Image: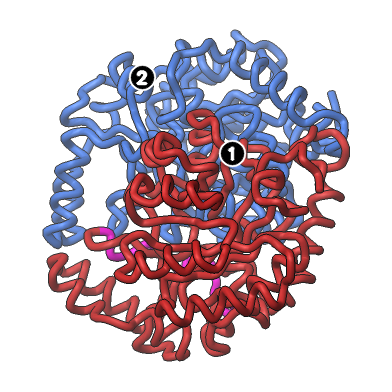
Chain colours: A blue, B red
Amino acid sequence: MNTSNRVCALLGIEYPIVQAGMVWCSGWELASAVSNAGGLGVLGAGSMYPEVLREHIAKVKAAAPGKPFAVNVPLLYPAVEEHMASIVELGVPIVFTSAGNPRTWTQHLHDHGIVVIHVVSSVKFALKAQDAGVDAVVAEGFEAGGHNGREETTTMCLVPSVADACEVPVIAAGGLHDGRSILAAMMLGAEGVQLGSRFVATPESSAHQAFKSAVLDAGEGSTSLELKDVTPVRLLHNPFAQEVMKAQQSGATPEELRALLGRGRAKKGMFEGDLNEGELEIGQIASMLHDLEPAGDLVRRLVTECRELGGPGLGGRFDF
Amino acid sequence: MNTSNRVCALLGIEYPIVQAGMVWCSGWELASAVSNAGGLGVLGAGSMYPEVLREHIAKVKAAAPGKPFAVNVPLLYPAVEEHMASIVELGVPIVFTSAGNPRTWTQHLHDHGIVVIHVVSSVKFALKAQDAGVDAVVAEGFEAGGHNGREETTTMCLVPSVADACEVPVIAAGGLHDGRSILAAMMLGAEGVQLGSRFVATPESSAHQAFKSAVLDAGEGSTSLELKDVTPVRLLHNPFAQEVMKAQQSGATPEELRALLGRGRAKKGMFEGDLNEGELEIGQIASMLHDLEPAGDLVRRLVTECRELGGPGLGGRFDF
């Protein structure tokens, strides 16, 4: 392992490439494929019942023996206490937290030797996370899929701002999908990268085939950040998203929007493949994805592209 | 001059750094300072009467003798015919066009030996510009200040998409302000960069001092893309912008928004320094600007940062 890269050293991985822990898309098959290829596979616990998460933790450990992996826990998730208990009990080495106060769980996880990384969309929250003692932050830009910040700060603006403000390593997210964009993020000050949409478009992701096809068909302008007055989320433009946009344009209240959103929309769309009624979360970069690629091949291709593009002149951060 | 960079070769400049031609901010003082330092200075003709543009062209030629410079002409500007006549008559070597059909003027300008570059916010319009015969395109992301695309595609997603789709050189814009971001944009496939907000924050820009101070005071989330149903524009959040956002939230029609916008708001804000009633156009990256820097020093610092960061391993595009 190359220890000149702080993200590799912190996470015990070969390449500073993290697969985002995404609701309905990232179970044990995807996470183990990524971890086996030298990146970091992450289970998305935000869409899992406690017993489902326990099953996925056991399966990823069996499928990628001895390899680091992580669990992403949205801190506003109702079963967060049960998830954290499973994580400690089953020896998960790394946790990504998001959507909540990083102070609540960081010390507890550290007490059990678990690395903690918090996902942020602003310098303000990055500093708050650092103050809470997290080991690194993911700085996720406006172009990223799913839940997102109100400031709408893009990856190009967010990553250098957070890198300048924080001492902990910064993992960039939002708009990253190939060697070019990974090196660009690192040039901006990131020491690692997190890719979400690109890993949705793999055979191993648990996204429904119909959703994967919709992702590959997406063009420019096919996604937008919606529900800003409720919880900002980047959606693929299907009939449900159109309905949301229409309601917003006619001045719907947050309560009316919450009623329209209802419950179970994300599962219906991303996991069950209902492209009309379901909520489809994906990043802007979907417009550049044109095929499914096995997750392990993808990690290896990204590393090769980075090495070819970066060359030896870029200093220690790129020597992976 | 280094001709391994296509943008340097096309424009006859030392460094592939373009100062954006911005309304009310970029007159002859700024443009000549940038051109004298080896970048490309650009006059923003969108806020100039025909006789004012002629005066600025004469002054930039006198202040930067023998150096390339350009004029930015928004094609929807009422006096576009008079502007184009002045440009031909006074021997302007390079024109940036935006906000209109690139087919209308490109051949005419080429017939007079003038290089034509069109500003785009999508692959669709980049291909349309290339088909119209332009010599290069500026790919401007969502984070950029001022007028912007409806697709909201960020620089991180837009630049590689346009670079993959087009054969003409791509100049990246949006969120760029230092050596890191310039190299990141080039890593994404750009062969040149255009910086706007960073050049507003110079002593030479013709922005009002009060506007410059407001730019330096901006924090994260201080700008947003508004008036999407009229003409999308990124605004600094002053009382006028707050009024626009409130009107939009309560479902104002495009006609009502146009009435609220009225006429002369941009001049009032950016040139006359009315921070309450004026329209203030600036990019997201304003949050990272903390001081005014003379434009020539700025160009030289950017080049130094690029050289230090890039090193020899990055191939010909970075050898400037």
Residue at figure coordinates x 62%, y 30% from the top left: A18
Secondary element type, mark 2: helix
Q: Is residue B15 above or below residue B52?
A: above
Q: Position of residue A199 (x, y in %)?
A: 50, 23
Q: CA distance from mark 2 to mark 1?
A: 33 Å
Quick check: A43 above or below B202?
A: above
Element class at badge 1 = loop
Q: Which mark is residue A212?
A: 2
Tell whether B228 sits left or right of B154: left
Q: Residues within 10 Å of mark 2 (few under 14, many from 20)?
A: many
Residue at screen point 51% across, 12% down: A293
Q: Is residue A290 left or right of residue B228?
A: right
Please, is residue A218 above or below residue A134 in the view?
Answer: above
Out of A92 and B27, give the one closest to the viewer: B27
The residue pinned by badge 1 equals B169
Q: Give a yes or no on whether discs 2 and 1 share a subunit.
A: no
Point out residue B14 in the picture as x, y percentages from the top left corner.
Answer: 77, 53
Is A162 magenta? The answer is no
Mark 1: amino acid: Pro
The residue drawn where x is 62% and y is 56% is B176
Q: Amino acid at mark 2?
A: Lys
The range drawn in magenta is B216-228
Within the magenta stretch, is there residue B219?
yes
